[in-house]
Amino acid sequence: MATGNILIADDDTAIRTVISQALSRAGYEVRTTGNAATLWSWVQSGEGDLIITDVVMPDENAFELLPKMKKLRPNLPIIVMSAQNTFMTAIRASERGAYDYLPKPFDLRELVAIVGRAMSEPKNRVHAEPLADIERMPLVGRSPAMQEIYRALARLMQTDLTVMISGESGTGKELVARALHDYGKRQKGAFVAINMAAIPRDLIESELFGHEKGAFTGATQRYAGRFEQAEGGTLFLDEIGDMPMEAQTRLLRVLQQGEYTTVGGRSAIKTNVRIIAATNRELGGLIRLGLFREDLFFRLNVVPLRLPPLRERLEDIGDLTQHFFALAAAEGLPLKRIEAVALERLKRHRWPGNIRELENLTRRLAALYPQEVVTAQLVDLELSDETPIATARHTAASGMDGPRTEEPGERQTLADVMERHLAQLFHGGGLPPPGLYHRVLREIEYPLISATLAAARGNQIKAAELLGLNRNTLRKKVRDLDIRWVRAPR
């Protein structure tokens, strides 16, 4: 049975009662109050082994009280609750020494579990000094999915752990990486980003590690690579799944040994950077196809963060729309408001381009229409039910640099795509790893089964019938290929 004395401060009597009953059943002694003054009095007198407090109290904000409590009793764990569920709330809680932050409404079982962990940990946790307040909020949204992201970021701010951010294109992966840097202990260093999909494959090593004068034709002077540019700060490796195998090997060596050599250089250079990687591709599939090193994946995937697509956080569309209209107004465009019916229309859209698509839409609405209030009719003019859902998941298992632009009247066949892909595999005259037949076969199966499942709306019996496969065979392939189908439009 758990033991210890818990102090609870919240001006909502119902919340105090519910938490008190849950913790009492778990074996703790509990005292409750509805104001900050009483809580501070208890803390001064040495009472309590742990505190649970709301942020907004009738007599004082908990964020103003936290530093005083931590100064007086630095080893006292404090759990902060708040209905103001923003990114900055989570960050301020972490900055001011809170053990954890819980957005309201919360799961009582989760709260009891957090209390148990806090009470069992050694009472010598060291918390970072508060960072300077930053006015502009980098991340927006109050949905449960985003609350989990905020809490994870708050825990990661004062660490140098390597983070792998996954998510569809347009979900804000670079924004999250920048938030980790801007609010972390390396904020005074440089934030350097490189997109692997945007750099020619034969130049990636030079871009990452730099090169010496004369290292290759055209190298007329020494070039400082991204590792050198990011020294003491953060290096963001975007679209890591597009990194060539040779560069993967060199990156792995850097992560293992903490040093690198420039292209054409002979001396090892020590490096001190925090690595944050991001991908919109399913790296597990690339590993199975021999296109991504498993050992590098484990080095990068120390802390995985998955950003939800906009269709999984539709309740955030109102906040996001208001945020983007405000940004557009700050850039000189007219300030817009959106009516409730128009907001509901936005929530019915599929958003294949995620947050980036929503931002582009709000900018068009701000720039092209004179009306101050955005109506559903205006939204309908910009949105169409024919917007194609994002189904180009085949790129998650390919080594192609990107889709080829079709000429007017031209349509690529599967044979065209595979011919280009095979040419890429044999690029430079080298040979790919053994097992090419099975890798290419799996590469074809992945998009075929994904698209069929989407068309069948997840019905595996129907999908198996369409494919001409036994249902058990289909189920095994779905499991082996780690297929997550995209729901087709109704």
Image (cartoon, rainbow, N blue to C red):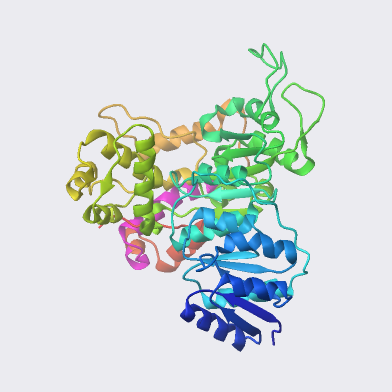
Q: Position of residue 63 (x, y in %)?
A: 59, 60
In the image, 317: left or right of 11?
Answer: left
Q: Image quadrant of residue 430?
A: top right
- On the rendered image, what quadrant is the C terminus found in? bottom left
In the image, 380: left or right of 207?
Answer: left
Residues 405 and 290: in front is: 405
Q: What's the residue at 68%, 45% (across, down)?
A: 185
- On the rendered image, what quadrant is the N terminus found in? bottom right
Q: Image quadrant of residue 460?
A: bottom left
Q: What's the residue at 78%, 69% (across, down)?
A: 122
Which residues are drawn in magenta?
Answer: 438-462
In the image, 407: left or right of 157?
Answer: left
Magenta stretch holds residue 452: yes
Query: Does residue 391 appear in the picture of this structure?
Result: no
Magenta stretch holds residue 144: no
Q: What's the residue at 22%, 56% (across, down)?
A: 341
Q: Position of residue 467 (x, y in %)?
A: 35, 58
